[in-house]
Amino acid sequence: MGKTIIISNRLPIQLQIHNGGINAVPSVGGLATGMKSVHSGGDSLWIGWSGLTDEEIPDELSGDIDEALAKHGSSKVNLTTEEVDGFYYGFSNRTIWPLFHYFLEYSEFELDSWNTYKAVNQKFADAIIEKANDDDTIWIHDYQLMLVPQMVKEQLPNISIGFFLHIPFPSFEIFRTLPWRTEVLEGLLGADLIGFHTYDYERHFLSSVRRLLGLEVSFNDIYSEDRIIKVDSFPMGIDYKKFSDAAKEHLQRTPENQSELQQRLNKHKQSTPDAKFVLSIDRLDYSKGIAKRLNAFEYFLNKYPQYKEKVRLIILAVPSRSNVPQYQLLKKEVDELVGRINGEFSTVSWTPIWYFYRSMPFENLIDLYTSCDIALLTPIRDGMNLVAKEYIATRTDKTGVLILSEMAGSANEMNESLLINPNNFEQIADALNQAINMPKEEQQERNDVLQKRLERYNVEKWANDFMTSLKNQKETSHTYVSRKLNEKLMTTVVKNYKGSKKRLLFIDYDGTLAGFHTDPQKASPDEELYDLLDKIASQENTDMYLISGRDKETFTKWFLPKKYNMIVEHGVWISQNGEEFRMLENVKKEWMEKIHPVLESFVDRTPGSFIEEKNYSLAWHYRKTDPDFGQKRATELNTVLTSLIANDDLSVLNGNKVMEIKSSNVNKGRAAMRVYADADYDFVFAIGDDWTDEFMFQELPESSITVKVGHQKTQAKYYVDGIKNVRTLLKRFID
């Protein structure tokens, strides 16, 4: 069994250069805690940046640092000051962070930063490739490294890769504004499993994949040319026991053993026994909604003046990215708001807001969590918000009220809290009033449910669930009915082909020999394709049929002068040896008058869709429509048609962005079998990409070589990755 390789922007180790030596101290909390169960023993490696730039590391200490990190199962990626500025402070935090948190006005789209981001992602990928083997499992973390999965997959196609995004993924309308949106999506799709905190983020990602890349999405599976990528949500938990045990130990301390902060809190509690402490802990970030929270608190004091001198808001703002201009402006705004509100409402014995702008040790966090009656957390956009979970975990007597923004990822798991819209001051004020007056029994009832849930789905379970899902995905990808037509199998197929006495080939066109086009008429054959088909068709003892849902007029124009054998409109028409098309099936077309107006109404209501009229079938194309809207309309149309054609011996074929209505007795399988019966063939080959080709795969004899284009569930024996591979395969028949 291979090792697990964890990759993140920062290593879970803090390096300190002191007196000419190096000291490596494990980080506490955050991802380091979450990955503890995965990053354990000698079977794992953590790759990331050490936190020290190349310029900060003396040459003589480089080896010592590597050695110190190795003791903690870690390996560093070297970054220069310029790379950190462009990659981390630039693209990651001035482009992706604001964009993904819906602060489009703060997003900077700088080409230099993007180029640095790409170069640094390649550095991380190279570091993985150097250390990894095919049987290893790779888990890449967060928005700083979104290109790494594809970079690794290109070099190590068989390795198992997971990716987890710890921030929100925005809606398509927001994401599409990113100039490098396609590159980011393709980078992420190098992973076999992509994880998000919530289903909403997962849904936004799938929508962007459909709309921007045009890939097929089925439930939470994405079908690329050669792979199936799974997308799922894994809400991150906390180390519940750590916080719960710390709170229990904290409450057992005697007054003289308590921290200075706790003694101060106790003093104020004693002076005003019925007063309430409202806690607010965040990084100083515009996504956290701290300024709005202060304004909402001011609104609350004005709406409910009876709580003046009875409620105190304690704000802990942890410094963050202080060299980014937006954060400097935010700090100034918060400072001014605190000063103004305190100036307006303070009395001799009461200051409404206690404001701390600093990091606090774990002990002091426990002081605040256990002492505060209410937690007020109102992020405007937040991937998860673990503070909400930490607060609940520390409430040993199950009292305390959590007021939580519905925009936080954790809100999906914490419905028992008071959920608010962070932009609605009226609602926040009312929630504070409700929290202050909530009976103790109700508090305990709500928190009992929350605590049981948080204890059950802790951070260790989050990590294990992701790794289990990644393992299952790897196993699932090998359980499809079809096998990849690899070199060894191909050699056998070619050998049988060349050793056969009489060959029969059925080759689909759209999605097999040629790519799809928004205008089907523009997907015409190129000279390379003509040359390939000419050579196959001219071989002795070889009957080659192009078999397609296309109309006979188009194939007459494209292929009749070549005298290829052709079956079109799914089996209605056949042309052999350059003869004019003749009907293979006796079909009616009277039904088309009834169906055509229905399709027209859907064209009118679905911008970008159109009708293709064939001789004996009608096709409604929606390739040019919005993917989600098109799929919705297709489902609606399918329902309408099913009821209309119930008694007419008609079928609806759901192809790739097309719905076709035709006679039930017409399909590619039936047509192929009629041709097969005409001669004694000892080699039969069929290849296609669409649902309509499944009839052919099903009907042809068991001895046939049937090939699906694309890695999807199929009746075919084998599959190939894409159109390019189809042509490569067919060339083997003529070499």
Image: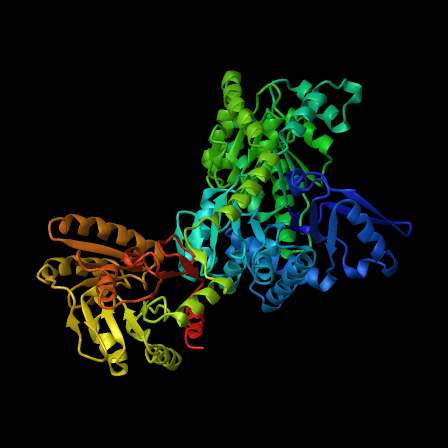
Residue 382 visible in the picture: no
Q: What's the coloring here?
A: rainbow
Q: Residue furthest right?
A: 19
Q: Quadrant of the N terminus?
A: top right
Residue at 52% across, 21% down: 443
Residue 674 visible in the picture: yes
User: Does 571 appear above or below 299?
Assistant: below
Q: Residue furthest left?
A: 590
Residue at 55% across, 32% down: 457
Location of residue 531 in the rendering, given as x and y in whole percent from the top left corner: 38, 81
Residue at 64% across, 39% down: 34
Is 176 on the left-hand or right-hand side of 616? Answer: right
Q: Quadrant of residue 597?
A: bottom left
Q: Quadrant of residue 667?
A: bottom left
Location of residue 109 in the rendering, given as x and y in whole percent from the top left corner: 55, 64
Residue at 28% across, 71% down: 545
Location of residue 427 in the rendering, given as x and y in whole percent from the top left corner: 45, 34
Q: Quadrant of the C terminus?
A: bottom left
Is 306 on the left-hand or right-hand side of 358? Answer: left
| The one of 378 and 228 positioned closer to us in this rendering | 228
Q: Quadrant of residue 49?
A: bottom right
| The one of 702 and 319 positioned closer to us in this rendering | 702
Location of residue 414 in the rendering, given as x and y in whole percent from the top left corner: 50, 32
